[in-house]
Amino acid sequence: IPTTDVSTAASTVVLGACPDTPPKLVGPLQVDFFTRRTLDEVRKELKGSLQEGGRYKPTECISKHKVAIIIPFRNRYEHLVHWLHYLHPILRRQQLDYGVYVINQDGDGIFNRAKLMNVGFVETQKYDSYECFVFSDIDLVPIDDRNLYRCFDKPRHLAVAMDKFNFQLPYNTYFGGVSSLSKAQYMRINGFPNTYWGWGGEDDDIYKRIVFRGMSISRPDSVIGKYKMVKHKRDLHNEPNPKNPDKLGHTQSTMDQDGINSLKYTVKKVEKDVLYTFITVDVDAPK
Ligand code: BGN
């Protein structure tokens, strides 16, 4: 309940904490990727409600959830436009205190999704005291706003029912697409591996780390956890890497050496747009 401070001439309202269940969620959403959108149009749609760098916090209450949304990225602007158009209004309705950080891999060496997510974890903490990190692929849009982009008492897997997998998990231990970890959960697994170059396996490695550190995961149900994926061709320089499946057999012995404690990278450029903070990094990718 907001209380009024009458000690000043102009009365100031002291905000209360936001409720546990955000009151303005609508449930299932219409999402389509056929409508052509430009970044400029999306900026015009959203700029009144956002702070520079893709930041937002509710004005009606104090959010309990300070969340850095981290998106590993390279050359997918057409997906970024859809993601921003749909996600900002959802995150706002969820009453999160959040920022959107696009972690852009510099150059055209082999892509490394998990290493970019580690970079996001370190870099975003330079902007605010984030305690919760949501890691999202650029091509995934939730189609139910009750799927909360925050942290829970267990590491959370959010992308449980994707259209491309017929709205089911592809397998029980799948942890790909979109996930959230608190700072403590993330530190407990030494972050993510830095050594999965190219497509495949890094999400399975993260799942194993969680289990090897005695945790389990939580998920929304498969109604709330529905996602649409923007259809696309495989990116250049992100081929399935035949070495990655073998690495998975060694996670337990490698995870203490390969992770946030061994992360090396160079920030090349930081650009603040009203819709996001765009961080370009050299991750020392093999060609
Ligand atoms: C799995 C991939 C995941 C990927 C899912 C869904 C591997 C490791 C060898 C088994 N795992 O096969 O990374 O998210 O498919 O596409 O390639």
Image (cartoon, rainbow, N blue to C red):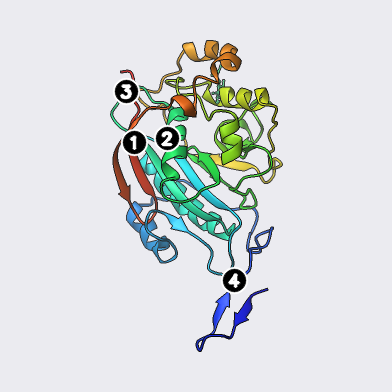
Q: Earlier in the sequence, mark 2 or mark 3?
A: 3
- For the image, the number of numbered tags is 4
Closest to the camera, between mark 2 and mark 1, is: 2
| Circle 4/circle 2 CB separation < 8 Å | no
Q: Position of residue 69 (x, y in %)?
A: 49, 45
The residue labelled by disc 1 is 75
Q: Earlier in the sequence, mark 2 or mark 1?
A: 1
* Vertical side of 206 occupied by 19: above or below: below
* Ligand 1 within 8 angstroms of badge 2 C-beta: no
* Vertical side of 266 occupied by 134: above or below: below
Question: Dot 1: within a 10 Å radius of its alpha carbon, few (fewer than 14), some, or many (20 or more) residues?
Answer: few
Question: Dot 4: within a 10 Å radius of its alpha carbon, few (fewer than 14), some, or many (20 or more) residues?
Answer: some
Is 47 situated left or right of 172 in this image? left
Quadrant location, ligand no. 1 = top right
Q: Is residue 180 visible?
A: no
The residue labelled by disc 2 is 119
Hey, which quadrant is residue 47 in on the image? Answer: bottom left
The circle on residue 109 is 3
Q: Earlier in the sequence, mark 4 or mark 2?
A: 4
Q: Secondary structure at mark 2?
A: helix
Q: Earlier in the sequence, mark 4 or mark 3?
A: 4
Taking depth in this image into account, of 192 and 126 the one nearest to the observer is 126
Q: CA distance from mark 2 to mark 1?
A: 18 Å
* Vertical side of 231 occupied by 98: above or below: below
Q: Position of residue 266 (x, y in %)?
A: 32, 32
Q: Earlier in the sequence, mark 1 or mark 4?
A: 4
The residue labelled by disc 4 is 15
Q: Amino acid at mark 4?
A: Leu
Q: Residue at (40%, 42%) from the top-left corner? A: 102
